[in-house]
């Protein structure tokens, strides 16, 4: 089994039984999600910015406007902490104290670098697009040179990585199990609604098939 070797920065200390270092499980979490939060520090001021991402092997790509604060700071090679979290259910216990959430999360540490190679940048943008809607890149107009210039792509090597997962029912105090209070797990599932076409779409264009959004089914 291939694993990410934990170190002093990535070893799960709180409830270590929930730690996951197996690469297959970590990759599955990253591939199911599509939104990450990027934490970084600029002149002793911390920032945490949500943004899209995509995994390609042992690399995580992040993209955004070249004019954004995050992109302008991260391309200087500062340390980052990137997290991805999937919520699977609300865990309702008999006591308020033992309420919880079933979740799967990944924390990645390291130094992101700016992607300057044109081919790698275009490949990353293709991956971003197809990560949301498989096959969408080939349907859409390809980016112009000006659009490429206005977009920055960063890549973070997946080296310092750990995951944490909670599953199962609530864990109440033994004396509370006799209380006449409902307890259990309420599953949380992300779904999609009916597509709303753009007002200027051509009548000849077929409706969008939401079944293409495979992560929701």
Image (cartoon, helix red, strand yellow):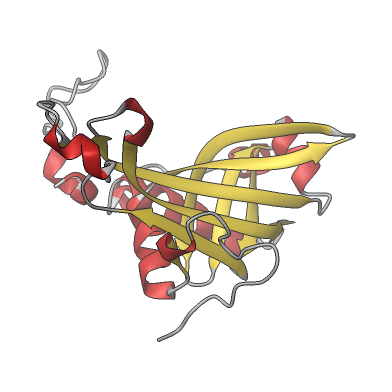
Quarter of the rendering occupied by the N terminus: bottom left
Instruction: Judge from the rendering whether residue 62 lies leftward or rightward of residue 130; answer left or right.
Output: right
Residue 24 drawn above or below residue 154: below
**Residue 151 is drawn in which quadrant?**
top right
Q: How many marks?
A: 0
Residue found at the very far front of the displayed protein: 175
Residue found at the very far top of the displayed protein: 199
Name the one closer to the observer, 111 or 10. 10
Residue 186 visible in the displayed image? no
Q: Position of residue 138 (x, y in %)?
A: 33, 52
**Residue 209 is drawn in which quadrant?**
top left
Q: Position of residue 145 (x, y in %)?
A: 62, 44
Q: Which residue shows up at 55% across the image and 59% down it?
A: 60
Residue 61 drawn above or below residue 175: below
Residue 35 visible in the displayed image? yes
Q: Which residue shows up at 40% across the image and 42% down it?
A: 141
Q: Position of residue 129 (x, y in %)?
A: 40, 47
Name the one closer to the observer, 29 or 129. 29
Q: Position of residue 25 (x, y in %)?
A: 36, 68
Q: Which residue shows up at 71% across the image and 36% down it?
A: 70
Instruction: Judge from the rendering whether residue 15 lies leftward or rightward of residue 68; answer left or right.
Output: left
Instruction: Judge from the rendering whether residue 2 lies leftward or rightward of residue 13; answer left or right.
Output: left
Q: Which residue shows up at 21% across the image and 47% down it?
A: 169
């Amino acid at each position: 089994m291939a694993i990410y070797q934990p170190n002093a920065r990535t070893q799960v200390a709180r409830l270590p039984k929930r730690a996951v270092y197996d690469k297959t499980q970590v990759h599955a979490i990253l591939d199911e999600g599509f939104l990450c939060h990027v934490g970084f520090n600029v002149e002793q001021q911390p920032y945490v910015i949500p943004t899209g991402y995509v995994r390609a092997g042992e690399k995580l790509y992040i993209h955004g406007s070249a004019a954004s604060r995050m992109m302008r700071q991260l391309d200087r090679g500062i340390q980052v902490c990137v997290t991805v979290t999937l919520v699977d259910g609300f865990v309702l216990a008999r006591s308020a104290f033992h309420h919880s959430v079933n979740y799967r999360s990944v924390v990645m540490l390291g130094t992101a670098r700016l992607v300057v190679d044109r081919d790698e940048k275009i490949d990353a943008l293709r991956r971003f697009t197809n990560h949301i809607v498989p096959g969408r890149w080939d349907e859409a107009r390809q980016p112009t040179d000006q659009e490429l210039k206005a977009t920055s792509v960063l890549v973070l090597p997946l080296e310092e990585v750990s995951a944490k997962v909670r599953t199962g029912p609530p864990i109440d105090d033994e004396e509370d199990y006799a209380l006449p209070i409902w307890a259990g797990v309420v599953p949380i599932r992300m779904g999609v609604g009916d597509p709303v076409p753009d007002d200027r779409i051509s009548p000849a264009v077929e409706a969008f098939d939401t079944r293409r959004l495979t992560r929701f089914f």
